[in-house]
């Protein structure tokens, strides 16, 4: 049984705590939040997440700093779900105390911060995983398998989309949201598809980016590869805030096309040279549970995790490059 301290008890922290309760080999050791326990209430976000009996928290110790929790509460790991600005200092403190770390995406905003994480991990046999949860969705796992196994021939093109109404809940109410701000969709929302594309096709040989006409917080980036493959990633925040979240992909292979649209449920449409069919992708466990299962297994057996520090840093670097391109008018032309 591995004991986990959850640091940050907002929307995602509560979701992870609920999933820890579901895992037979994990135990919620403590919660860290800047607010006193009496002031913490259930938080909802823009997607459905796990729920648990709030009374189960009665016996869980709460601390206002990670230092207190690490000093007073026996633990094996720290799960960081705080605002991104606190990810690096909290991760460094956990690493210093010899704890395995699961940290929500994005890992950080800059390569300087990333370098400090790499240096801290050097020579330590610790599990370090970043919560790029899209890799654990059944639809995206199905596509990844088809690409890696060359199931339908070469991947010729891939379009990834992800958008939602401009958020006006929680801390978002107080933020000035822009496409290139660290509190914008590039680092918060579309980083999921950026990470997924990098895991699937690697870093592009050429990359362009454009602002979409629908909104200043919508963008489109096109990646070109020397082997001829093209990847297009688009999306962002768009008004009104009531617009439901949606995501999907359109993948063209030599001998098939795979499509997914989250608005139409858990299914992938596969069109081959002989037929078009629907593949049921409804999973017994959520992608958030799946990533924790991998984290727990890595702690127990030493098995590798998909979203390690190196891969997360690569994603941060790519987001930074896109941000720089968007801030240069000569290289950023409206669609």
Image (cartoon, rainbow, N blue to C red):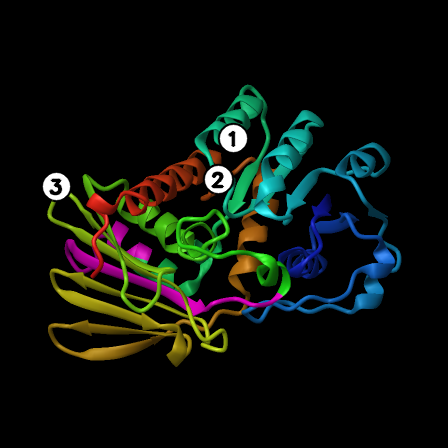
Of marks 3 and 1, the one in the foreground: 1
The image's mark for residue 226 is 3
Please name whichever residue, 209 or 128, is drawn nearer the observer in this view of the structure: 209
Residue 86, how many percent across, how many down?
Answer: 63, 40
CA distance for labels 1 and 2? 7 Å
The residue tagged 1 is 113
The image's mark for residue 315 is none
Q: Secondary structure at mark 2?
A: loop
Q: Secondary structure at mark 1?
A: helix
Q: Which residues are magenta?
A: 144-169
Between discs 3 and 1, the one toward the N terminus: 1
The image's mark for residue 109 is 2
| Relative horizontal placement of residue 258, taking residue 7 as reference (left or right) | left
CA distance for labels 3 and 1? 31 Å
Q: Circle 2: is it few (<14), some (14-19), or many (20+) Cα within 10 Å?
A: many
CA distance for labels 2 and 3? 29 Å
Q: Secondary structure at mark 3?
A: loop
Does the residue at mark 1 contact the one at mark 2 (Cβ under 8 Å)? yes
| Relative horizontal placement of residue 71, taking residue 289 as reference (left or right) | right
Quadrant of the image occupied by residue 67: top right
């Amino acid at each position: 049984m591995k004991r986990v301290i959850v640091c940050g008890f907002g929307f995602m922290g509560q979701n992870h705590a609920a999933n820890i309760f579901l895992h037979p080999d994990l135990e919620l050791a403590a919660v860290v939040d800047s607010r006193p326990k009496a002031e913490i209430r259930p938080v909802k976000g823009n997607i459905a997440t796990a729920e648990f009996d709030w009374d189960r928290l009665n016996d869980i110790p709460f601390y206002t700093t990670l230092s207190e929790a690490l000093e007073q509460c026996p633990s094996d790991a720290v799960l960081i779900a705080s605002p991104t600005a606190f990810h690096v200092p909290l991760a460094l403190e956990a690493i210093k105390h010899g704890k395995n770390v699961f940290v929500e995406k994005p890992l950080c905003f800059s390569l300087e911060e990333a370098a400090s994480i790499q240096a801290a991990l050097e020579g330590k046999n610790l599990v370090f995983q970043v919560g790029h949860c899209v890799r654990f969705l059944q639809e995206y796992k199905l596509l990844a398998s088809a690409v890696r196994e060359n199931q339908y021939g070469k991947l010729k093109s891939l379009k990834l989309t992800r958008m939602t109404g401009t958020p006006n809940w929680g801390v978002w109410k107080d933020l000035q949201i822009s496409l290139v701000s660290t509190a914008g969709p590039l680092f918060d929302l579309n980083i999921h598809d950026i990470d997924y594309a990098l895991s699937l096709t690697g870093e592009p040989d050429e990359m362009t980016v454009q602002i979409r006409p629908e909104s200043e917080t919508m963008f489109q980036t096109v990646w070109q590869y020397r082997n001829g493959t093209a990847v297009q990633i688009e999306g962002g925040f768009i008004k009104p805030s009531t617009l439901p979240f949606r995501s999907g992909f359109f993948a063209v292979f030599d001998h098939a096309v795979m499509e997914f649209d989250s608005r139409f449920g858990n299914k992938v449409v596969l069109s081959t040279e002989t037929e078009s069919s629907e593949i049921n992708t409804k999973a017994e466990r959520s992608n958030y549970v799946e990533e924790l299962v991998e984290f727990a297994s890595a702690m127990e057996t030493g098995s590798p995790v998909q979203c390690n520090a190196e891969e997360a840093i690569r994603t941060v670097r790519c987001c930074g490059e896109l941000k720089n391109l968007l801030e240069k008018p000569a290289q950023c032309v409206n669609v």
